[in-house]
Structures are given as structure tokens and as C-alpha cells.
Image: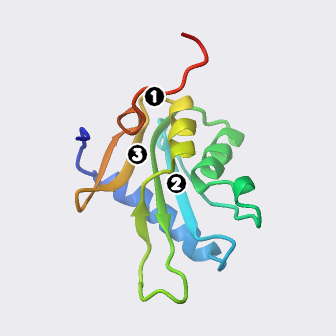
């Protein structure tokens, strides 16, 4: 069972930033996930994932938002969120929050073990520490 926290108003603003970036840049079979990160200084960076014909080289939206933040000199992260945009053939009107994939969990934790992640859990949208999602994290040293 995860140790979760309820969302604050600024968490909903972070979700909105992720929704806005994917709604603006959605392209079928190219970009359908948007992510946003809030840094410890309160700045928000949002980006979309970059789909590739060879799935292995696709870059997740969380990684893109992280890179965008670092490129702007922000290296300390507070909270991440990702949202999915509905495809034209789906009978869904709005974006929805999705949990980070395993690689993104590793990446986020590499850049801050205290970072929180917003995700769906037990029918609610909540946040928790990234390490809750990554027990026994990989380490190169023993």
C-alpha cells in the first residue's frame, strides 16, 4: 500500500500544465503524453513525449520535461505528473493522469529521491514520493 497525500491547488495547476502542452501538441501516433514538472523554486516545465517508429528510442514526456528544466538551469525537482490525450478513435473527451513507467520512475528518482509523483491510485488522483513506486532501487554501488 502506498503512502499517499491529497493534492493541493498547485498540483492541479501542474496537471493543467501537462494537459495544455499535450492538447496544443497532440499528433496521432507521434505525441499523446504530456508531462509537467514543478521545481523547488516553483517553476513549471511541460513537454510532450517523442514517439519513434522503433519503440525503444521513444523518449517519455517526463524525461523531456526534466531535460527542459535542466536546460533552463533548474536542477531541483518537487513534483512530476503525466497525462494521456485521447486518440480520435477513443470515446473519451478529456486527458487523464497516468502513472510514470518504470524507466521514468528510475529517472525521476535519479534526480531526486524526495520528488513526488502525481498518479491515479485506488480510484483517486493522489501524490506520493517516487521511492514509494520504486522499492529496492538499482544502485551501482553496494
Quadrant in the picture for residue 119: bottom left
Asked if residue 47 is positioned above or below residue 136 in the image, the reply reads below
Residue 124 appears in which quarter of the rendering?
Answer: bottom left
Q: Is residue 29 above or below residue 34?
A: below
- Residue 7 seen by the camera: yes
Residue sitting farthest toward the top: 142
Work out whether mark 2 precedes mark 3 in sequence or the reverse, and give the earlier one: 2
Residue under numbered circle 1? 113
Residue 7 percent across, percent down from the top left: 27, 52
**Picture layout, residue 21 above or below residue 119:** below
Cα separation, mark 2 vs mark 1, equals 17 Å
Q: In which quarter of the image is the C terminus?
A: top right
Q: Count residues near mark 1 (Cα–Cα under 10 Å), then give few for <14, some for 14-19, many for 20+.
A: some
Could you say which quadrant of the image residue 28 lies in?
A: bottom right
Real-space Cα separation, disc 2 to disc 3, in angstroms: 10 Å
Q: Which residue is drawn at 50% across and 30% down?
A: 112
Q: Do the residues labelled 2 and 1 touch (CB within 8 Å)?
A: no
Query: What residue sits right under mark 3 in the picture?
Result: 117
Considering the image in quadrants, where does the N terminus appear? top left
Badge 3 marks a residue whose secondary structure is strand
Instruction: Give the residue number, with chain letter if any, for mark 2.
Output: 36
Q: Residue at the spot x=69%, y=72% of the render?
A: 30
Q: Residue at x 77, y 67 (%)?
A: 53
Amino acid at each position: 500500500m502506498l503512502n499517499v497525500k491529497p493534492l493541493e491547488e498547485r498540483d492541479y495547476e501542474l496537471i493543467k500544465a501537462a494537459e495544455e502542452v499535450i492538447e496544443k501538441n497532440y499528433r496521432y501516433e507521434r505525441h499523446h503524453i504530456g508531462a509537467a514538472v514543478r521545481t523547488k523554486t516553483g517553476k513549471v516545465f511541460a513537454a510532450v513525449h517523442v514517439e519513434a517508429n522503433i519503440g525503444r528510442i521513444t523518449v517519455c514526456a517526463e524525461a523531456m520535461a526534466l531535460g527542459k528544466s535542466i536546460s533552463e538551469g533548474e536542477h531541483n525537482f518537487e513534483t512530476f505528473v503525466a497525462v494521456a490525450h485521447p486518440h480520435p478513435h477513443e470515446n473519451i473527451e478529456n486527458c487523464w493522469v497516468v502513472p510514470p513507467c518504470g524507466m521514468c520512475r528510475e529517472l525521476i528518482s535519479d534526480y531526486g529521491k524526495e520528488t513526488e509523483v502525481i498518479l491515479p491510485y485506488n480510484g483517486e488522483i493522489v501524490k506520493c514520493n517516487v521511492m514509494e513506486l520504486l522499492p529496492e532501487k538499482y544502485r551501482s554501488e553496494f
